[in-house]
Image: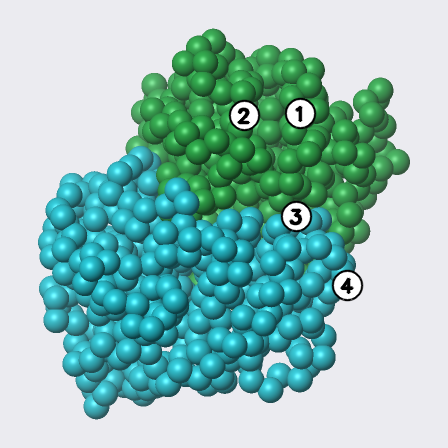
Chain colours: A green, B cyan
């Protein structure tokens, strides 16, 4: 593995108490930079300068595997949803450390996508090499230019998050999501399963993300107050459905990483198959319930939690009085259709983990036992 | 949904303190019954009387989706491993409540497998109907004969676990695994990717399972003693890799369901991407480390846990002194190659959850908030 040139010396905290908070607030900028120069709004298409796969190559794919670890794996799960929904290509998501030791089914019609902020994640790199041996085309989503994974892949979609210092990934994650939105548009347009209109709509939604994120960042003070009331909690559950389910997983991982609270994310519909047994008045449950296609289902899962005494922190659409009337805490995100909800929901998830950790006094930017870039197996 | 005829009145505890314990001990019998009459050992093949898919149909499949909830979803994850490893067909596993509300990619070349003990699980039934609408062939793995899912599917592989009364599934789970082993052999042989020799070897491994389970059940007394030392634990982690990773998930779910301890399963290789931050001297970590292809990797993950003060309960192969020298507790399972490890490892997982719950005084057969058959969404 190559040396990574960025270091803490290159970045300054710029008035923020921690790199993590600075990076959370940088997200609108990071998203703008990742989009910049890539949109072909007129054609309802995007241009990915290092993708190295033309329309014919993209049409020749019959299956996609997205391979990643940790936070990047959550981005991959959102990617599966986006690609299957808009492009009708089957997508499998796998954990790199699992994929590389299976006997994975990959051939020359398989597109293998690798997601890694550092581009040096050992298991992801090994998974890519194994995929290439089997004839798969490999496209990497990386933040570090010229990193090992980016160099060895057939194509790259770089995120332009800038150097991320906090061990708990924030701006790298949301730019990975943006890269997946852009790739989805490119794939859908090249395969002619996405209409000009649909391409334009999805581009327009992506373009609105930075402003929506700025709006969501105004939750910061409220989230800090909320955090004070949950410091004693030893456990948390996070629930979501559909494309927001991976954000529940990511919210739980953030809290786990930096506050050492045992948080777990679940697909809301799985609650009744086990974890609901955990629910009592000591269990805070974060429920992602923005307006969107699964709203009613998540709402009813939320009611089940409340009926069993769980303390609900709901993340809902602005002005959703029905939710607000039911729960202990409601964090309202700006409403804007639902195509980009995973991006906007990520912000209160990050802020909640951050403030709980700061109030608990843990080392937020450098949590115990964790490394920024996992270059060992 | 149809009425399920089995009830608690039909089964007796037969001298056991709880149905769950009785059902754990019935597993060798349940496995024998599920295998009975289905093996064609001479041909290295199996006969699945209600599968309704001939060799030509099985050869026409280009992708498999396995859909399930809760414990059955863990069986599905083992199934993915088996089918990809032995049959080289890509397999996607999805949670029923997620699958049915996506826009899933299913066509007439997709085989959709549904796993449900009761055959009445609402989300799984809905997922099947949606798959059929899209042209997919549907095969169910059910325990209850003539249940809704079994009746509406194109084909069925019945498990012969007998009525399962304990809410936490045990014998239904292991017979689901057996059904997946049998299906893997049938699929591999029909597609001519599995040789006569390989078919015979896998059959021989399956045939040895009941005796190996009887051996593993002798752990009961040791596990009860171990359980006494972990009653105060508020959290548990369970780690495994490869085909044993789903058993780590299942072990955690069992403990969660009946003891209300917040247990979480993880792919061992993902530890360093987040959950390792949780590890300290208060955190018991169950590590599934039997001899097999990922042994060295799991062993090194186990050492990382120990280095951070975690209390390890290792489940290892009989006589593995290297593991025993390292850990607080070692539960030894009989060694027999590694093809059927998920089945054998399940037993100490079930016993550990059972004894912790009994000692904590919870209602083991009827845990709070949970229903045996989830016939609501």
The mark closer to the camera, 2 or 1, is 1
Earlier sequence position, callout 2 versus callout 1: 1
Q: CA distance from mark 1 to mark 3?
A: 24 Å
Give percent across and percent down for residue B260. 51, 49
Residue sitting at x 67%, y 56%: B283
On screen, residue A109 above or below B173: above
Mark 4 burial class by Cα count in 10 Å: few <14, some 14-19, many 20+: few
Residue nearest the observer in this picture, B177 or B165: B165
Q: CA distance from mark 3 to mark 4?
A: 16 Å
Q: CA distance from mark 2 to mark 3?
A: 23 Å
Q: Quadrant of residue A213?
A: top right
User: Circle 1 is placed at which residue position?
Assistant: A229
Q: CA distance from mark 2 to mark 4?
A: 36 Å
Q: What number of labels is visible?
A: 4
User: Circle 3 is placed at which residue position?
Assistant: B274
Residue sitting at x 69%, y 63%: B311
Earlier sequence position, callout 3 versus callout 4: 3
Disc number placed over residue B307 in the picture, else none: 4
Regarding mark 4 in the picture, which secondary structure is present there?
helix
The mark closer to the camera, 2 or 3, is 2
Regarding mark 2 in the picture, which secondary structure is present there?
strand
User: Circle 2 is placed at which residue position?
Assistant: A313
Residue furthest bottom as drawn: B42
On screen, residue A196 above or below A372: above
Q: Chain of mark 3?
A: B
Regarding mark 1 in the picture, which secondary structure is present there?
loop
Please report contact status of discs 2 and 4: CB closer than 8 Å, yes or no: no
Give percent across and percent down for residue B269. 61, 59
């Amino acid at each position: 593995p190559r040396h990574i040139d960025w270091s803490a010396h290159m970045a300054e905290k710029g008035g923020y108490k921690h790199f993590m908070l600075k990076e959370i607030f940088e997200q609108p900028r990071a998203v703008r930079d990742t989009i910049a120069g890539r949109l072909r709004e007129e054609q309802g298409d995007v241009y990915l300068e290092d993708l190295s796969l033309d329309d014919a190559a993209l049409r020749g794919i019959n299956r996609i595997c997205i391979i990643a670890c940790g936070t990047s794996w959550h981005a991959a799960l959102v990617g599966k949803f986006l690609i299957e929904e808009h492009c009708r290509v089957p997508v499998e998501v796998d954990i790199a450390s699992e994929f590389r030791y299976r006997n994975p089914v990959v051939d020359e019609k398989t597109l293998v996508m690798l997601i890694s902020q550092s581009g040096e994640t050992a298991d992801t790199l090994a998974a890519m090499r194994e995929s290439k041996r089997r004839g798969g085309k490999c496209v990497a989503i990386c933040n570090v230019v010229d990193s090992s994974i980016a160099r060895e892949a057939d194509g790259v979609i770089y995120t332009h998050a800038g150097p991320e210092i906090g061990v708990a990934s924030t701006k790298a994650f949301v730019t990975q999501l943006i890269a997946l939105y852009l790739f989805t548009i490119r794939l859908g347009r090249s395969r002619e399963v996405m209409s000009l209109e649909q391409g334009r709509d999805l581009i327009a939604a992506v373009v609105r993300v930075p402003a929506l994120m700025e709006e969501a960042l105004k939750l910061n003070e409220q989230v800090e107050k909320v955090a004070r009331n949950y410091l004693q909690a030893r456990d948390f559950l996070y629930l979501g459905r559909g494309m927001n389910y991976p954000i529940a997983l990511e919210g739980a991982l953030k809290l786990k990483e930096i506050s050492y609270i045992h948080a777990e994310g679940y697909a809301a519909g799985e609650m009744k198959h086990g974890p609901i047994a955990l629910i009592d008045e000591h269990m805070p449950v974060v429920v992602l319930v923005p307006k969107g296609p699964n709203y009613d289902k998540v709402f009813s899962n939320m009611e089940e939690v409340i009926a069993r005494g769980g303390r609900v922190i709901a993340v809902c659409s602005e002005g959703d009085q029905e939710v607000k009337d039911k729960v202990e805490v409601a964090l309202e995100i700006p409403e804007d259709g639902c195509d980009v909800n995973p991006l906007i929901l990520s912000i209160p998830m990050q802020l909640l983990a951050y403030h709980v950790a700061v109030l608990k006094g843990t080392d937020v930017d450098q949590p115990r036992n964790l490394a920024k870039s996992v270059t060992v197996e």
